Image (tube, rainbow, N blue to C red):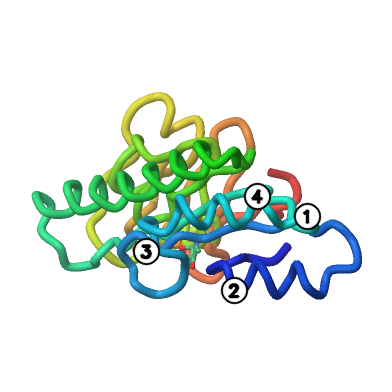
Amino acid sequence: MPTLLDLEDAQTYERHATRRLKAFLKFDVGLERLGAAPENAPSLGVALRALHHLELRGVYTHLHVPPHAPAEEMYPYLQWQFARFKSALEALREAGIEPSIRMAASSGVLMQTDEMHLNAVDPGHLLFGMYPSGPRRPPAGPAARSTLAEESPGAGQGGESHRIRGAGAICNPTRDGHRCVPLRHL
Ligand SMILES: Cc1ncc(COP(=O)(O)O)c(C=O)c1O
C-alpha cells in the first residue's frame, strides 16, 4: 500500500491507476524527513476528496524523538508534534476524510508516553526486541502494558527482551538467548 507524501504523489497515483487504490497519507510534524506539512492539511483534504481512484486507509506520522534531549524538554516537544498531527487529522475530517487508521507512536514515543496511541501504533525497534536510542521510560499504566511491552527479567543486562501480554515473547535472539516466538504467532 503506497504512502502519499503530498498532493503531487496523490495526483500521480490517480493519473496512472487502473483500479481503486488503497493508500496511506503521511504528515511531517517535526522529523523534517518525509511527509505533507500539517498546515497544508485543509487544502490537501479538499484536493484528495476530488480524486476518484484513491481510498485513504490511514494517516500517520513519525514523531521526532531526539536521543539526547533532556527529559523536561522531551515531553513538551512530543506534545507539540502530536498536536500538529491532531490538527492535520481534524482538518482532514472537516474536509470529509476520516481514515480508519491513525498512528503516530513509534518505539521512541511508546518509551515516553501512553498518550499518543491513537488507534494504531507503529513500532519498529520494540517489535524486534530492541530499544531505540534515547531516554527510556518504562511503559506505565494498564493501557500501555496491554498494548505493548513489559520488561522481562534480564532486560537491560546485555539482552533486551520484552513480553507482549497474553501473546508471547519478542526478543533479540542474537543477544539474550531466549526462545523467540515468531511474529506470526503474536
Ligand atoms: C514511519 C516510521 N514509522 C515507524 C518507524 C519505526 O521506528 P522505531 O524503530 O523507532 O519504532 C520508522 C523508522 O524509521 C518510520 O520511518
Using the image as rendered, state which of residue 29 and residue 76 is in the foreground: 29
Q: Secondary structure at mark 3?
A: loop
Q: Which mark is residue 120?
A: none
Q: Which residue appears at 46% of the width and 65% of the height? A: 36
Q: Which residue appears at 45% of the width and 60% of the height? A: 27
Name the kind of residue labelled 2 in the image.
Glu
Q: Which residue appears at 45% of the width and 53% of the height? A: 41
Residue beneath disc 4:
49
The x and y percentages for residue 125 are 47, 62
Using the image as rendered, state which of residue 97 and residue 158 is in the foreground: 97
**Mark 4 Cα within 10 Å, few/some/many (few <14, many 20+)?**
some
Q: Residue furthest top?
A: 142
C-alpha separation, residue under disc 1 versus residue under disc 2:
15 Å
Name the kind of residue labelled 3 in the image.
Pro
Q: Earlier in the sequence, mark 1 or mark 2?
A: 2
The x and y percentages for residue 9 are 62, 72
Residue beneath disc 1:
52
Q: Which mark is residue 8?
A: 2
Q: Earlier in the sequence, mark 3 or mark 4?
A: 4
Q: Which mark is residue 132?
A: 3
Q: Taking 135 as reference, is 144 above or below it?
A: above
The x and y percentages for residue 10 are 65, 67
